[in-house]
Image: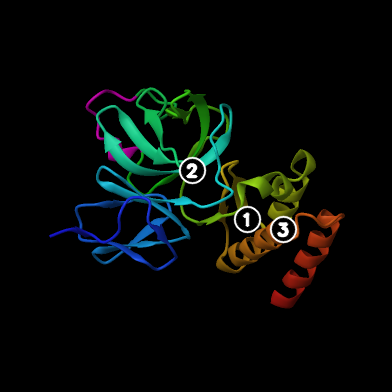
C-alpha cells in the first residue's frame, strides 16, 4: 500500500522520505530508492496527481519561448510525453514534435523516449497559464544517451557557456567530453569517467566563481593543471 508521508507545500531537505510505495512517480527534485521516493534538494513539496516533486525555494528557472533546455521524461500519454523542465512547470512533447521522423498514432512511444530519458529540446510555446510545449525538431536536438546530468544555478548558465560559447568550447576541447548546457540549469556531460568528473568539477567551479573577472583564462589553467596531474 502506498503512503505519502508529506503534505502539499511542506518544506523538505535532501534525503527526506516523501513516499513509501510504487503507486506514485518521482518527479522533479526527487529520486526513487527501492520502493520509496526521497527529496533530492531543499524545496517545497508539490503533489500533482500521481507525481510528487520538489519546487526549489529560490533561483527557480522560468521557461521562456525559444529556450534550449534539457528535460526529463516522466510520463507517456497517447498524445506524447510529459517532461520535467527543472522548474515548477512541466512541458508537453507531442507526437508531432517528438522526432524528426513521422510518429504514427498508436505507435510504441517507449521506443522513441522512455520514462527517465533526458532530451535536449527547444521550448516552442509558453501560455499565460504556463502550459509549455517543447520540440525535438531542430539542429542538435536529440535524446541524451549515457553520460551524466548535473544541475547548476540557471542564472549562471551564461557564464558556463561563455561569450560566443568560449567557456563551454574550452571545456569540450580540454576534456574531450560532449557537453550540452540547457538554459534551465541542467548540463549533460559524456566522456571517459575521469574526464566526465573533471568537467563536472570544473562546471561547479565556474558556477561558484562566476563573478570573477578573467574566469575563462583561469579555468583554462585549472584544467591544464588537473589534466597534468591525471596523466
Q: Is residue 30 magenta?
A: no
Which of the 4 image quarters holds residue 69? top right
Q: Secondary structure at mark 1?
A: loop
**Marks 3 and 1 close (CB-CB < 8 Å):** no
Callout 1 environment at 10 Å: few (<14), some (14 to 19), or many (20+)? many
**Relative horizontal placement of residue 166, taking residue 103 as reference (left or right):** right
First reached walking from the N terminus: tag 2 or tag 1: 2
Q: Over which residues does the magenta segment extend?
A: 103-112
Q: Is residue 178 left or right of residue 13?
A: right
Please state the total of marks drawn on the protein image: 3
Q: Secondary structure at mark 3?
A: helix
Residue 108 lies in the magenta-colored region: yes
The residue where tag 3 is placed is: 206
Quadrant occupied by the C terminus: bottom right
Label 2 vs label 1, nearer the camera? 2
Q: Quadrant of the N terminus?
A: bottom left
User: Mark 2 and mark 1: span between their CA atoms?
Assistant: 26 Å
Decide whether the magenta segment is chiefly helix, strand or loop: loop
Q: Pointer 1: what residue?
A: 177
Q: Residue at x 59, y 48 (%)?
A: 59
Foreground disc of the pair 3, 1: 3
Q: Give the crowd class for mark 2: few <14, some 14-19, many >=20 residues within 10 Å.
A: some
Which residue lies under the disc numbered 2?
87
Precedes in sequence: disc 3 or disc 2? 2
Front residue of 37/178: it is 37
Is 80 left, or right, of 134 in this rendering? Answer: left
Which residue is at the front of the view, 89 or 151? 89
Quarter of the image for residue 95 reads: top left
Amino acid at each position: 500500500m502506498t503512503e505519502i508521508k508529506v503534505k502539499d507545500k511542506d518544506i523538505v531537505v535532501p534525503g527526506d522520505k516523501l513516499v513509501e510505495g510504487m503507486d506514485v512517480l518521482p518527479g522533479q527534485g526527487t529520486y526513487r530508492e527501492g520502493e520509496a521516493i526521497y527529496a533530492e534538494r531543499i524545496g517545497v513539496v508539490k503533489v500533482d496527481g500521481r507525481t510528487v516533486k520538489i519546487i526549489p525555494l529560490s533561483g527557480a528557472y522560468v521557461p521562456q519561448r525559444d529556450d534550449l533546455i534539457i528535460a526529463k521524461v516522466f510520463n507517456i500519454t497517447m498524445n506524447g510525453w510529459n517532461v520535467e523542465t527543472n522548474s515548477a512547470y512541466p512541458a508537453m512533447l507531442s507526437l508531432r514534435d517528438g522526432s524528426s521522423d513521422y510518429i504514427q498514432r498508436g505507435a510504441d512511444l517507449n521506443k522513441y523516449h522512455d520514462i527517465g530519458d533526458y532530451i535536449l529540446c527547444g521550448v516552442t510555446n509558453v501560455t499565460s497559464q504556463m502550459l509549455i510545449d517543447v520540440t525535438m525538431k531542430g539542429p542538435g536536438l536529440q535524446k541524451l544517451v549515457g553520460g551524466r546530468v548535473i544541475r547548476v544555478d540557471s542564472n549562471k548558465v551564461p557564464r558556463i557557456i561563455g561569450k560566443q560559447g568560449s567557456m563551454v568550447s574550452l571545456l569540450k576541447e580540454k576534456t574531450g567530453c560532449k557537453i550540452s548546457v540547457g538554459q534551465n540549469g541542467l548540463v549533460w556531460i559524456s566522456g571517459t569517467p575521469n574526464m566526465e568528473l573533471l568537467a563536472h568539477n570544473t562546471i561547479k567551479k565556474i558556477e561558484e566563481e562566476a563573478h570573477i573577472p578573467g574566469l575563462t583564462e583561469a579555468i583554462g589553467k585549472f584544467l591544464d593543471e588537473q589534466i597534468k596531474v591525471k596523466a
